[in-house]
Image (cartoon, rainbow, N blue to C red):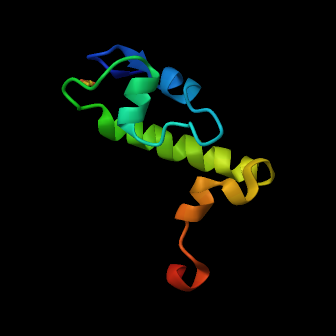
Amino acid sequence: MIVCSCNVFSDGQVRACLNPGPGCPRTPAQVYACLGCSPKCGRCARTIRGILSRALAEAHETCTSACGAACTLKAAEPAPAEAA
Ligand code: FES
């Protein structure tokens, strides 16, 4: 599915640029840069953010042993006392 009609890229291309590690795009702007383009109208930013959130959450479920203490997603989670 095309998510950005200005730059003509798909949800699959967004997911393909999500590599594990510190260089992984975390924002729509970083996704545009990863795909070699820049935002034009910005209508796709919310959709890209949703794809990022879902893909990174899925990756985090399976990466706990791979990235361990260096996991930036783990650091963003609230502490147990804050979550209540
Ligand atoms: S739809 Fe992506 S910048 Fe316009």
Q: How many marks?
A: 0
Q: Position of residue 7 (x, y in %)?
A: 31, 15
Along the line of sight, the residue nearer the viewer: 55 or 71: 71
> Residue 10: percent from the left, percent from the top?
44, 20
Relative to 67, is 73 on the left or the right? Answer: left
Q: Nearer the viewer, residue 82 or 68?
A: 68
Image quarter where the N terminus lies is: top left
- Is residue 44 shown left or right of residue 35? left
Q: Please name the residue shown 21% across and 23% down the image.
A: 40
Measuring 57% from the left and 45% from the top, which residue is drawn there? 56
In the displayed structure, would residue 75 be above or below residue 33? below
The image shows residue 34, relative to residue 54, as above or below, that is above
- Give residue 41's position: percent from left, percent from top: 18, 26
Extreme-top residue of the structure: 8
Which sits in the foreground, 82 or 58?
A: 82
77 versus 3 height, above or below? below
Q: Where's ligand 1: which quadrant?
A: top left
Q: Quadrant of residue 2?
A: top left
Q: Residue at x 53, y 45 (%)?
A: 54
